[in-house]
Image: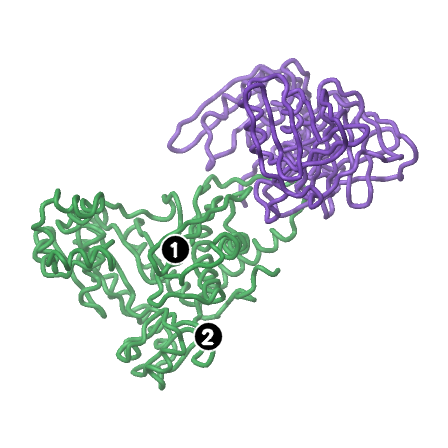
Chain colours: A green, B purple
Amino acid sequence: MILHIDMDAFYASIEERDNPSLVGKPVVVGGSAEGRGVVAAANYEARKFGVHSAMAAARAKRLCPHAIFLKPRIDHYAEVSRQIRVIFEQFTPLVEPLSLDEAFLDVTGSEALFGPSAEIGRQIKQQIRDKLHLVASVGVATNKFIAKIASDVQKPDGFVVVESHEIQTFLDPLPVGRLWGVGKVTGQVFEQMSIGTIGQLRHVPLNTLIDWFGSSGEHYWQLAHGIDERRVVPDREAKSISNETTFAEDITDPDVLRAWLVELVEQVARRLRQHDIKGRTVDLKVRFANFKTISRSLTLPEPTNITHELLEVGIELLTKRLPSRHPPVRLLGFGVNKLDGSGTSQQQLFDRPDRNRHQDVDRVADQITAKFGKLALRRGARLDTSDD
Amino acid sequence: MKLNCHRGSLSSALQIVSGAVPARTPKEILKNVKLQVTDSEISLIGTDLETSIRHVIKDCESDQSGEVLLHTARLQSILREIPDERVALEVTPEALIVKGGRSRFRLAVQDPSEFPTIAAFSEENYHLIDAATFREMIRRTIFSCDVESTRYALGGVLVDLGGDSVTMAATDSRRLSVISSPCTVHGTVGETNSPVIPHRAMSLLEKSLAEGDEQVKLAVRGNDVVVQAGQSTLYSRVVDGRFPRYQDVIPKEFNATIELVAGPFYSTVRQAQIVTDQESRGVDFEFSADTLTLVSKAPDIGESRVEHPISYSGSEMKITFDPRFLAEFLRVLDAETQVHFCLIDPQSAAVFKVGESYTYVIMPLAQDH
């Protein structure tokens, strides 16, 4: 069985936990209400006013003038994320983090030790509450697709188990928009065909779906029947490590994009270092408002997991390799592949003091973050790293 | 102006000069080459403003002096497709007409005065190096250049010009090629002159040197180098930035020296490369009595052991190298070349020596932490 664990309003909840006077008030993390910037997260109180992540901070301020705006402390959130992961790893080594606040766990092999999957899910949820004073929504199901929906349907503080014989009754009433891969365009086709629920979709023959959508047709058919064979891939086995984020509101400001890139790179680099692996090829993925998606990649002479080196390449790709005029950006992704876990490094003929220094910075940063999570350690000059 | 050229000569001149023509440029005019007829010679000129080549076309006559711009790719296609031995060019202010026996092309022309002019070699003071040697020196160093890096000084070959010898060095900081050869001086040249010539210019030079060429003339003028060899004169901007002190990283003393013959050893290394991939680039070189064993392992691919007989009596030792760095070096040697493989320990640089003048230094891979 697969667990999908998704933290509720993660950034905002951490801020509330660390400063209880915020509880019950609308809290917006990210940007400044006066100037530019985007909302990184909003608590449920703020969401009641229509505030959501990736919205321009100025707009959030208009929607909810009395909200409390906080600067995001990504390193701190990453540290909490690491603490959550420690809890996961008590139960299974098969943990696939999707981002700081979300992960898949394969607990099939853990049942003999810890009891049924649902019980494991409940224990994890309880430990996150007891030890970290945070709330997770948990979905327990036979595959990733259903587990992910299950964690979402009763959010916040959700706990939903879908046993294999319950799949159809669980999926059938849900709107087709829940299917992964169904966006605006596909959604319109379903609407024209009067298909509103997954149950209705399930009764459409496979061939008809292939006629409508080509190869995606089979994908929808499988999902509607509750079939999803993707494995849970822990980082250390992965062929690539990546992270992406979809903005609820498309981004045009290059500085904001760059700031998001810095966060993505930091997370990917930290994951590489956690597992002592390095990557050689850096990929940048950008999806524009018109859903056109492009990828740009660069291969380094040597594999690395040094944040600074990965960031340099990421910024190079972002600033120099995108079309000079492009639509607003809907999704930004950063990934590293050609992974090298050999634990060896090519020795250099000439000393590279700069490289050693960046390595030291990363090591110290990782240690500090691991030890004193609350210390908000942040990389300097976040917005102009390319200038050094 | 009317010209009559041997098609092959014109075609090979165009081939050489097109090496300097930029593939992408904001200045469209640079996609052309200039044909220039003076009293003394007929030459083709190509440039990307960083690197320029002027090449004299042999077996070509003109009824008067003048110049015209030729669209590089289009003229190359014409010369490739027409079967005739000779080709006639006729230049009018409006057009260029290219004629073979049964073909006639009338091509639009651009104003040649807008194209930069590249002078013929006219230096008084320069170094003189045997052309075949010069070509071999380029071949034996250029592959070590770091063309990917942002450390610009490594993106070229250092040409260290002394009074009676010239040394070329190239490195990507993982391996280093150094080769020296005698030279002579014409006129008076500065004491120390060590330009770093860009990879691209060196590669063009290597290609433009023809078999029969005898001497290469090389002069440094401020930020440019000028090299003349046979029919070609090449100008290049030199690379900015400091080339590392390469002499300091060449070890002088070793714990073991093994004699190898390039061809068979290259074959062994190529075998060892089969079971490597991007992710596991290291090959273990295990030295034991009379045998060198190359051990490769790659997850998802498999493993290999390849033995190579050597004369070795030292203690057993294992050094991990990226086999590409050995292969690239062995590839530029003749199969029967004698090579000395000089070792210190698994953490230190290893050195290949060919004769007295060619040294190749390679850093091993080492365990992290």
Callout 2 crowding tier (Cα within 10 Å): few <14, some 14–19, many ≥20: few
The image shows residue A136 at horizontal and vertical percentages of 26, 66
At 33% across and 83% down in the image, what residue appears? A64
Position of the C terminus of chain A, as image quadrant, is bottom right
Q: Which mark is residue B53?
A: none
Q: Which mark is residue A36?
A: 2
The image shows residue B303 at horizontal and vertical percentages of 43, 26
At 38% across and 46% down in the image, what residue appears? A236
Q: Is residue A82 above or below residue B34?
A: below
Q: Is residue B168 visible?
A: no
**Mark 1 secondary-structure assignment:** strand
Total label count? 2
Q: Quadrant of residue B14?
A: top right
Point out the tag, 1 or 2, that comes first from the N-terminus.
Answer: 2
Tags 1 and 2 touching, CB below 8 Å:
no
- The amino acid type found where label 2 is placed reads Arg
Q: Seen in the image, is A181 located left or right of residue A377?
A: left
Q: Seen in the image, is A4 located left or right of residue B130?
A: left
Q: Is residue A216 above or below residue B218?
A: below
User: Closest to the observer: B337 or B36?
Assistant: B36
At 67% across and 17% down in the image, what residue appears? B259
Chain where mark 2 sits: A
User: What residue is disc 1 on?
Assistant: A243
- The amino acid type found where label 1 is placed reads Asn
At 72% across and 47% down in the image, what residue appears? B240
Q: Is residue B138 above or below residue A222?
A: above
Chain where mark 1 sits: A
